[in-house]
Image: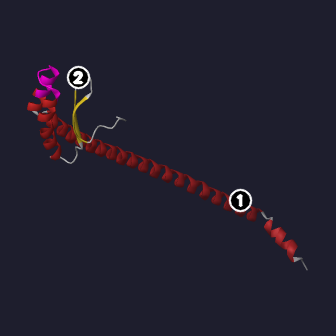
Amino acid sequence: MPIKGSSINAIDSSPSNKLHKYLRLRIIAGLIITSSLIGSATIFLLYSSQTKQLETELSLEIELQTIALESELSRLQNIATQITSRTYIREKLEEYLQEKVELEALINISRPILADAMQKTDDVVGINRLDNDGKPLIQVGDPIPNTL
């Protein structure tokens, strides 16, 4: 009577079983390699797509912020231009610089007009008129901080 264990070993070592195991290993290796290649290609394509999308979104966001900042700066520049374009005060300042008007008269004339201009907008907390050397002549509202 043959021993069961020895017949199993004989069957496992037959050429057809070896071929079967070899083919299974090749199929499994092929599937793993194919899956890895498809997965890698998919990940690369998704990464490229997302990178382009994020770059586009970032560029758009930067452009929108730039437009908003330019708009705000333009608005503030218009306010500053309106305040400094007070013809009467500008003429009196020129007269003071030419020593035709006293400082006290310049201050008395300018302060009410500048205070009125300052009250017309919430964005202005103080107005300073400077002489040619950059020293303050007239101050209405909050002073300029020393740190500036």
Amino acid at pointer 1: Tyr
Residue 132 marker: 2
Identify the secondary structure beneath mark 1.
helix
Residue drawn at point x = 33 percent, y = 47 percent: 61
Q: Specify which label sits upstream in the sequence, 2 or 1.
A: 1
Quarter-wise, where is residue 2 in the image? bottom right
Amino acid at pointer 2: Asn
Q: Please identify the quadrant where the N terminus is shown.
A: bottom right
Residue drawn at point x = 49 percent, y = 49 percent: 44
State the image coordinates of residue 143 (x, y, percent, origin top left).
28, 39
State the image coordinates of residue 138 (x, y, percent, origin top left).
20, 33
Closest to the camera, between mark 2 and mark 1, is 2
Q: Is residue 22 left or right of residue 131?
A: right
Where 124 sits versus 36, above or below? above
The magenta stretch is 92-103
Quarter-wise, where is residue 116 in the image? top left
Which residue reaches farthest left?
A: 88
Disc 1 designates what residue?
22
**CA–CA distance in space, label 2 to label 1:** 95 Å
State the image coordinates of residue 107 (x, y, percent, origin top left).
16, 33
Where 86 sits versus 7, above or below? above
Q: Please identify the quadrant where the C terminus is shown.
A: top left
- Residue toward you, 77 or 122: 122
